[in-house]
Image (cartoon, rainbow, N blue to C red):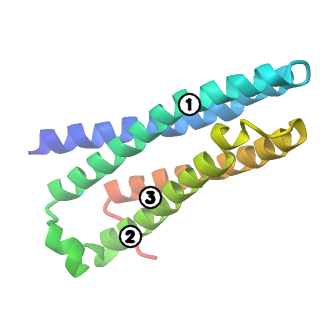
Amino acid sequence: MRTVYLLSLWLHVVAAGVWIGSMVFLGAVIAPVMRRLDTTRSELSRQLWEEVGRRYRIVGWMSLALLFLTGTINIGLRGYRGSDWIEGTLFAGSFGRTLLGKLLLVALLVGLTLWHERRLGSQSLAYASPEEWRRWRRQAAYLGWGMLLLSLLIAGFGLLLARGGFSF
């Protein structure tokens, strides 16, 4: 059983690494290149952002799905049952409070991810004027960096969980 737990935990960490790493790559590598390209060829920049967004969406949602699956498995392998969720006993003690904090942050991250994709994503930008395009792209960038910081905070909560949680 310990081997299954370690494998599931490893997959959880890898999925978190893909999620966070891809956000850093988009913000620190792709976005600056696109900004430079946008000054000379804004239509090409817009098309590239749409394609990058379409492809990243698959990686992002697959990472989040794997995080959800392995997180649920990890909690089960630590001895918690579905009834512990329903009765609220899962959230007792330092481990439970840390888990609750992490899950609330995850819910916020998923909500922001949906909003980022639906409201600021390439689908809604496809018909914007160049001025609107720049404004929306700037908002998407700020939200993306905020989501990265939130993801790093969630990863910190995950490390605390691996160590048994903390009291707060």
Report the residue at 14% width, 40% height from top.
4
Apparent side of residue 102 relative to residue 84 in the rendered image (left or right)? right
Left or right, residue 39 beside residue 55:
right
Picture coordinates of residue 20, whole percent (x, y): 53, 39
- Toward which corner of the image does residue 125 lie, by quadrant? top right
**Residue placed most toward the observer, 2 or 145:** 145
Q: CA distance from mark 1 to mark 3?
A: 30 Å
Q: Residues within 10 Å of mark 2 (few under 14, many from 20)?
A: some
Which residue, given by chain and number where applicable, does mark 1 sit on?
54
In the rendered structure, find residue 157 and report the number of the disc placed on it: 3
Q: Which-is-in-front pick, marks 2 and 1?
A: 1
Is disc 1 in contact with disc 3, using a CB cutoff of under 8 Å? no
* Dot 1 crowding, Cα within 10 Å, few <14, some 14–19, many 20+: some
Residue 29 x, y percent position in the rendering: 70, 25
Residue at the spot x=14%, y=66% of the render? 81
Left/right placement of residue 79 relative to residue 150 reads: left
- Whole-angstrom CA distance, mark 2 to mark 3, is 10 Å
Q: Quadrant of residue 30?
A: top right
Residue 45 visible to an observer of this rendering: yes
Residue 111: x and y, percent? Answer: 52, 59
Q: Nearer the viewer, residue 147 or 37?
A: 37
- Pointer 2 and pointer 1: residues touching (CB < 8 Å)? no
Along the line of sight, the residue nearer the viewer: 129 or 137: 129
Distance, label 2 to label 1, CA atoms, is 32 Å
- Choose between 108 and 17: the one closer to the eye: 108
Residue bearing mark 2: 100
The first of marks 2 and 3 along the sequence is: 2
